[in-house]
Amino acid sequence: MQNVPMEGNTAELRHIPVLVDEIMAFARQAITPLPSLPNERELWCVDATLGDGGHSLALLGLNERIRVLAFDRDGEMLARARARLHQSAILSPLLTGTDFRQMRSRLRQASSVRHWRVHANYCHAAAWLTELGIQPRFVLLDAGLSLFHYKAAGRGFSYSDSGLDMRLDHALTDPEDQKAAALTSESSFAGQNAEAIPALVWLNQASESEIADCLYQYGEEPLSRRIARSIVQNRPFGSARQLADQIRTIIPIARQRKERIHPATRVFQALRIRTNDELGALSRAVASLSPLIEPGGMFAVISFHSLEDRIVKTHFKTIGQRLAARQQQDGNADQTLEATGQTQKRPKEWKVRRKTTTGDRPGWWILTPRPLRPGESELQRNPASRSACLRVLQRAATDA
Ligand SMILES: C[S@@+](CC[C@H](N)C(=O)[O-])C[C@H]1O[C@@H](n2cnc3c(N)ncnc32)[C@H](O)[C@@H]1O
């Protein structure tokens, strides 16, 4: 993502949601009423990463019966989303605290409220759903950061920032949200990663080998050792800008010319992932959320780099293989392959292929044996979408 300094009102800066058509095509399928479900029943969706609310708005537009429970660990994003939803005349109260009995009754009574926000890490989303008694039909997790973080948050995600904090957990900033949190007499950070320290603090005190390991593991940076040595020799660092300038001096010019990314991209990615335990949160979220999805429902995950995608792919395959094992026992290897998506060709465009079997086969379908990526027109409209990669899993309509 490029560094463009922002001017003017940051509320006007909007994250452009990625792969919306593709995701809505899957979601539309997921909410198609099953014959066994009463028609008037509400359809719960989870937006695990609310951000600026673009995907939430698209989900709400699919069907009047859809209700969305949306998470974000960043209180500043929750405020931005509330303002945006408000512009579309959508009320989105904050659910906070641990009095789940009271929250369940609020959800029941305010049945006309279609969007609710939760200030929490998505790795706790499954616990929230269980406590609130919600079984979602569609779960979307759009990993990573929003455009606001890169361009205007001033927390060190941008190479030109004057700080280098990088913590995503951020207090509530909307006065209404703060009031709601105060009423529960609990910290708005309940359940958040309270031990996280700013990236700068860690970088200025970690050993050379710890820094090298971090850059290699989370940034896949081939020059991790050389960069770590230079960081230790040149610290303390005071800002993202200073760190980015230092890294620019280490990366060979030939590599800088060849790669079309900022020379500090891998280092910043590694520090951000480490600071926020991003991979741990993603692993816990995909493992804990999938069992809660309603039969026939879907789980869609958008990732932005190979480390995230590997977690999603592995988890989806593990679930798929459970189906494979069971069907092989039935001596039905062909159907097994098809059901786990092994023989499915990548859909030409974004059109969703209906699998041959619904309703009577237990287990999970992998609807995207290969991840879907933005098409040409999306890339032109939104170049920042270029690394997005979508995988979708569907729970069969009936369980074994
Ligand atoms: C890519 S943006 C989502 C954009 C959103 N889909 C939209 O349409 O605007 C990711 C959002 O997820 C939030 N986030 C990242 N990791 C999170 C986590 N572990 N738990 C909850 N929210 C998280 C970030 O604060 C950010 O607002």
Image: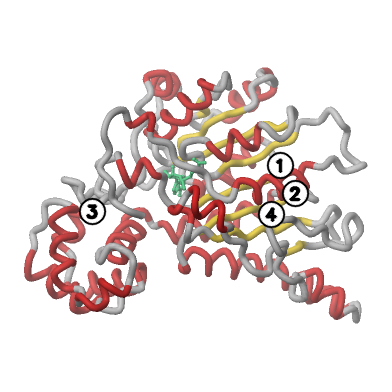
The amino acid beneath tag 1 is Gln
Q: Nearer the viewer, residue 126 or 351?
A: 351
**Distance between mark 2 and mark 3 Cα atoms:** 40 Å
Above or below for 56 versus 173: below
Q: Looking at the image, is mark 2 or mark 3 nearer the viewer?
A: 3
Q: Mark 2: few, some, or many residues within 10 Å (few <14, many ≥20)?
A: many
Q: Which residue is mark 3?
A: 159
Lower position in the chain sequence, tag 2 or tag 1 = 1
The residue identified by callout 4 is 291
For marks 3 and 1, give the CA distance.
Answer: 41 Å
Give 35 or 185, whichever is nearer the viewer. 35
Q: Which residue is at 84% across, 28% downward? A: 40
Marks 4 and 3: which is nearer the front? 3
The residue that mark 2 highlights is 297
**Residue in the image at 86% along x and 74% along y:** 335
195 up-or-down from 372: above or below: above
**Left or right of residue 314: residue 276:** left
| Residue designated by label 1 | 135
Q: Earlier in the sequence, mark 3 or mark 1?
A: 1
Label 4, residues with CA under 10 Å away: few <14, some 14-19, many ≥20: few
Q: Residue type at mark 2: give it.
A: Gly
* Among the two numbered marks 4 and 1 on one chain, the one whose residue lies closer to the N terminus: 1
Few, some or many residues within 10 Å of mark 1 (<14, 14–19, 20+): many
Q: Position of residue 217 (x, y in %)?
A: 36, 72
